[in-house]
Amino acid sequence: MAFKDKEKKLFLSSLRNNASEHKLLTSLLFLCIIATLLLFIPSSSFTISASDLRFCISRISQTPPTPSPPPPPPPPSPASTILHEKLILNNNNTNIIKRFFHPYGSAAYNFITMSAYRGGLNTFAIIGLSSKPLHVYGNPTYQCEWIPNIRTNTNSSVEKITTIGYKILPDWGYGRVYTAVVVNCTFNETINVNNNGGKLNLYASTSGGGDTNYNITDKMEVLVEQPKVLDLTLFDSKPKYEFFYCGSSLFGNLNPQRVREWIAYHVRLFGPKSHFVLHDAGGVHEEVFEVLKPWIELGYVTLNDIREQERFDGYYHNQFIVVNDCLHRYKFMAKWMFFFDVDEYIYVPPKSTIRTVLDSLSEYNQFTIEQMAMSVKVCLSDDYGKTYRKWGFEKLVYKDAITGIRRDRKYCVQPRNLYATGIHMSENLVGKTTHNTEGRIKYFHYHGSIAARRETCKILVNKTNVNYEKTPYVLDTTLRDIAGVIKKFELKMIGSRLQKTRQ
């Protein structure tokens, strides 16, 4: 019963609301009719103002006006001008969705030149970096072009000479975004035979690699020879240096004391007809430079600033192009050229000299050198309290005794017979290679010591054999025994200016 009463009240309330709205609409309709009739009555007999009409309407309407609707939403943004897809008819008259791809930015460079050098009367080597994916998945090609200088007293046209460039990838697949490339340009005739000068251009073509719609060819000028500068006797003359060192990229916070020890040791070993080329990739900070400066002043060391190469993501600070640049830059100035690192020490037996050893290997254009891996943590108890005063190779006297494993080797070459080189050996040379050098020459490797600025000795022992961190070591004082000789040699050569060098 209560439910029916509630329905009845709701019905009556609805009627009252509808009646009120009906009354308002009727009044408005009436006013509209009156306003229409007034249009046909002469203005002289009857007038009504707009204000009178508004007053009248306001008296009739007792309910608040209905709120206006919200404004319409803003129009949609115009369609993108980039077309990502499109409905098309294929060859079978069937609707398919065609998708589109829009490239932005830039990929790895086609070629980055570092240097170019003559390799003889008719051959050149161009050293640089190139996109590794381009070489792994594509087939980039190179062309070399020699343009002789125009002689001012003739009207003859310039005859360009071209040849196919032969590419060599010497980094054994270790490249990253960029890989090292050596382009060999060998022409069918002597270049610049009249010594009038000219320039060498390289054309590097992607050959559809990267984007098959394009065969992009970049032209670059890589070498200029000025008139009357070419020395044609250079390629057959006796080299200036007997022993030459080409160093890899030096990077990180290097220990100046370790660098000091290394350069003094090897200048003494290689002798007065030697030279050392070092490459600063950020590792030659002020303290390191101070220990190199005396040897630079004496003419034993040349320092190259190669920090700009850090822009290009290659393997280990682009060391492959660094050593190849050194090879080709100095190949006619050196009889023997060594490749090893500044935490490695070359050693020959006491009854030998570096000259007699290399003379015994002269039939080979390349030989590799056996490694002696040394601990940088195990030291002698005799050095307790004074390890910080000892030179690195003087206090690090325990050799890794594990046998039957392959260790990395370093190497030495007769550089005039190489087209390109690597870190542990060259695979691009003319002539023979030997690895059978045990007993004649070896190197001691103090891995990690060159970048350690604090004392590396962790334990002090008084044993011939010791196991540390699951590795057996055996006492080897070979270099410790000659530490005094090296210190006296340094003092004789450059005085006491480096005596206060710190780690």
Image: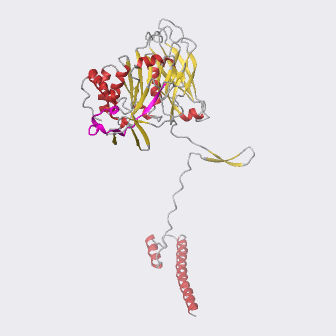
Q: Quadrant of the C terminus?
A: top left
Q: Tell me the quadrant of the picture where the N terminus can be found.
A: bottom right
387 in the magenta segment: yes
Write down the region rendered in magenta: 368-394
Q: Is residue 309 left or right of residue 87?
A: left
**Front-most of 79 and 490?**
490
Q: In the image, is residue 204 above or below residue 362?
A: below
- Residue at image position (58%, 35%) is 210
Instruction: Say how the picture is coloured.
Output: secondary structure
Specify the farthest residue to the bottom.
1
In percent of width and height, residue 3 lies at 57, 90
Q: Residue at the location (45% across, 73% down)?
A: 54
Looking at the rendered structure, the number of numbered marks drawn on it comes to: 0
Q: Residue at horizontal 50%, vertical 14%?
A: 120
Please state which of residues 5 and 486 is positioned toward the viewer in this rendering.
486
The reply, left or right, for residue 321 in relation to residue 253 is right
Between 455 and 175, the residue placed more toward the observer is: 455
The image shows residue 24 at horizontal and vertical percentages of 52, 79
Q: Position of residue 496 (x, y in %)?
A: 24, 25
